[in-house]
Image (cartoon, rainbow, N blue to C red):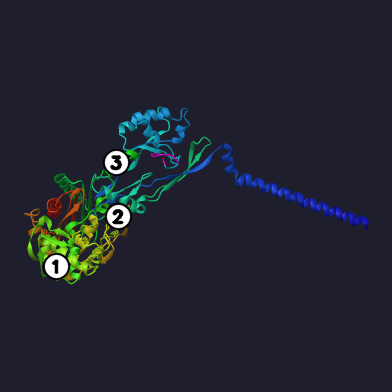
């Protein structure tokens, strides 16, 4: 009995031992399978010192086109010289000799070239390379073919240097619309349409997976997904009108000695932008190949059409007429236009101290009588009325228009003041009032179209590379002018006389009003310590455009901005004749 029990215990012990041995074998076999089959490649790569890196492949960026499909920003394939930073780093001298020869071939300063291949990071000044160290670093764009061939044929002198054909941004119309088109620059920033519509234009990056040995050298390409080209942006800009506006602005500033200025052309009935010109400007091709810190500091990047702010002078009086009507003043009544009007102990003079007798409100606009508006503003101020300010904000002043461009200025509509005389200055577009050329153009476009305020749009539609439309861009309606239809018709009628018999008649002498019935308003705004700011705001029913010109230190509106606006209108008329 005891022997059987002992044998049973021995058998159970042997069984347990077998189970343990089998379990250990299974575990060992499983581990070997995992190491050799599942993780074999990883360990082989580790043994060989090989790792995998992913490099982004930049897509072809979409074009920016004008309303007729003419390229404003396009792509051109040119020889580009690139440097393999890792390969240079493994040279005995760190690549200094190669860079020296390359700098001489490219006719670039050595320091500038060396700066381009430094990796960006904390404490690293620009220029530097913000991308991957495992991709070629472009150091020169649009290289002459002869230089590119020289580098290619002398690879022994230029190890780690390659030349290939790559697309770069080109600007067929040169400086025209440079501020509006904008830029995207690593380490510098972004602006204009390139920034606002970047998601549409950028496309989808591809990727290249490469094997890299423990020395940092790419040994082979493991796989590659191609990039997808970006969509193109069709704008409402008319390249021909843009060029006309740029020339008119430059001519007027040269003639008057003005320091800066802007011109805006809007489609009155739609809120679309046909042209935005600003001076000083710059040539956007400067971005090709990147800019140094010194070059960037010297660029004139302020878009004065959208970001410039000036006192509007008498162009503001259209809002003051609407305010007077809203406050109960009759537009057909007669008002005195003496040489001056006294507010408290201060005499506010008419322009040139002219005494023009009595006139209707229409005459006050046509002849631009200041004292009519001084009196009405002072009377409303003494009654505690906020109608002038509320009417001005209803015209869209003191608020951004909402255009599809970054950095838009807000302008200024001062709050009601307790000081006598501030209201009088407010009524003629002085005394802290500031507008941008775009704000004024939008208000005059609303006068022309019957009262609708739009958020202007430069973009018109986004199209795929095959030409099909992704989406259309429609300027949204943001409000209505705070004036009745009768008041708006009255203002339009008065402004139609300004270039015919009013303050702009000399500038428009002989103009073909039968073809383009231009209406408008001159403005001359004082600027402390500077010459006057010159304005002319205008519109026509056919073609239904609104044109606004401002010249900083350009003198009187009738002598500076009005002739420039006429030049733009004549150019538009010439385009219509060509069609």
What residue appears at the point 46 percent right and 28 percent down from the top-left corner?
A: 93
**The C terminus: image quadrant:** bottom left
Q: Secondary structure at mark 2?
A: loop
Residue 173 position (above or below residue 460): above
Q: Which residue is mark 3?
A: 298
Using a 10 Å C-alpha cutoff, classify the residue at mark 1 as few (fewer than 14 neighbours), some (14 to 19) or many (20 or more). Answer: some
N-term mark: 3 or 2:
3
Q: Nearer the viewer, residue 387 or 134?
A: 387
Q: Nearer the viewer, residue 248 or 19?
A: 248
What residue appears at the point 86 percent right and 55 percent down from the top-left corner?
A: 9
Q: Looking at the picture, how far across and down is residue 437, in whole percent? A: 22, 55
Q: Looking at the picture, how far across and down is residue 254, in whole percent? A: 16, 44
Is residue 127 in the magenta section? yes
Residue 543 seen from this side: no
- Looking at the rendering, which quadrant does residue 494 occupy? bottom left
Q: Secondary structure at mark 1?
A: helix
- Identify the magenta region: 122-129
- Alpha-carbon distance for marks 1 and 3? 47 Å
Q: Looking at the picture, how far across and down is residue 143, in whole percent? A: 32, 35
Is residue 319 in the magenta section? no
Disc 3 + disc 2, Cβ < 8 Å? no
Question: Main structural element of the magenta stretch: helix, strand or loop?
Answer: loop
Q: Which residue is mark 2?
A: 408
**The N terminus: image quadrant:** bottom right
N-term mark: 1 or 2:
2
Disc assigned to residue 210: none
Residue 456 position (above or below residue 218): below
Using a 10 Å C-alpha cutoff, classify the residue at mark 2 as few (fewer than 14 neighbours), some (14 to 19) or many (20 or more). Answer: many
Q: Which residue is mark 1?
A: 490
Using a 10 Å C-alpha cutoff, classify the residue at mark 3 as few (fewer than 14 neighbours), some (14 to 19) or many (20 or more). Answer: few
- Alpha-carbon distance for marks 1 and 2? 31 Å
């Amino acid at each position: 009995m005891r022997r059987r029990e002992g044998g049973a215990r021995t058998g159970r012990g042997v069984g347990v031992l077998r189970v343990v041995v089998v379990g250990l074998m299974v575990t060992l076999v499983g581990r070997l399978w995992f190491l050799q089959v599942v993780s074999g490649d990883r360990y082989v790569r580790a043994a060989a010192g090989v790792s995998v890196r992913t490099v982004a492949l930049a897509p072809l960026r979409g074009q920016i086109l004008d309303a007729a499909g003419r390229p404003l920003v396009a792509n051109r394939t040119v020889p580009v010289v690139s440097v393999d930073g890792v390969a240079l780093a493994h040279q005995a001298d760190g690549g200094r000799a190669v860079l020296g020869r390359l700098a001489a071939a490219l006719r670039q300063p050595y320091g500038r070239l060396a700066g381009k291949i430094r990796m960006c990071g904390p404490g690293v000044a620009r220029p530097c390379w913000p991308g991957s160290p495992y991709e070629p670093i472009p150091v020169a764009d649009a290289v002459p073919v002869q230089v590119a061939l020289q580098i290619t044929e002398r690879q022994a002198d230029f190890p780690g240097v390659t030349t290939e054909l790559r697309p770069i941004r080109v600007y067929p119309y040169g400086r025209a619309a440079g501020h509006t088109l904008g830029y995207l620059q690593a380490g510098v920033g972004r602006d204009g349409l390139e920034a606002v519509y970047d998601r549409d234009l950028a496309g989808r990056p591809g990727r290249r997976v490469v094997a890299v040995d423990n020395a940092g050298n790419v040994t082979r390409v493991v796989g590659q997904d191609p990039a997808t080209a970006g969509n193109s942006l069709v704008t409402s800009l008319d390249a021909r009108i843009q060029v006309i506006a740029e020339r008119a602005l430059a001519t007027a500033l040269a003639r008057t000695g003005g320091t800066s200025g802007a011109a805006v052309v809007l489609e009155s009935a739609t809120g679309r932008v046909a042209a935005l010109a600003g001076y000083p400007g710059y040539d956007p091709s400067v971005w090709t190949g990147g800019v140094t810190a010194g070059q960037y500091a010297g660029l004139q990047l302020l878009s004065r059409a959208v970001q410039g702010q000036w006192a509007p002078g008498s162009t503001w009086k259209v809002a003051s007429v609407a305010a007077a009507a809203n406050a109960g003043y009759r537009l057909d009544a007669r008002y005195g236009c003496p040489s001056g009007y006294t507010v408290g102990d201060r005499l506010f003079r008419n322009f040139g101290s002219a005494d023009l007798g009595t006139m209707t409100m229409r005459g006050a606009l046509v002849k631009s009588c200041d004292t009519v508006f001084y009196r009405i503003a002072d009377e409303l101020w003494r009654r505690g009325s906020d109608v002038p300010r509320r009417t001005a904000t209803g015209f869209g002043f003191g608020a951004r228009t909402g255009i599809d461009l970054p950095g838009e200025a807000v302008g200024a509509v001062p709050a009601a003041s307790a000081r006598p005389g501030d209201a009088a200055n407010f009524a003629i577009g002085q005394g802290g009032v500031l507008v941008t050329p775009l704000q004024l153009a939008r208000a005059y476009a609303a006068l022309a179209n019957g009262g609708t305020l739009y958020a202007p749009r430069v973009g018109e539609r986004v199209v795929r590379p095959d030409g099909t439309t992704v989406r259309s861009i429609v300027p949204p309606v943001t409000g209505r002018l705070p004036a009745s239809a009768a008041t708006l018709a009255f203002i339009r009628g008065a402004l139609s006389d300004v270039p015919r018999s009013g303050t702009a008649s000399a500038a428009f002498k002989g103009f073909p009003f039968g073809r383009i019935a231009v209406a408008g308003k001159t403005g001359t705004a004082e600027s402390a310590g500077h010459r006057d700011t010159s304005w002319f705001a205008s519109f026509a029913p056919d073609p239904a455009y609104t044109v606004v010109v401002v010249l900083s230190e350009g003198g009187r509106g009738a002598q500076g901005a009005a002739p420039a606006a006429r030049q733009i209108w004549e150019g538009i008329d010439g385009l219509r004749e060509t069609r």
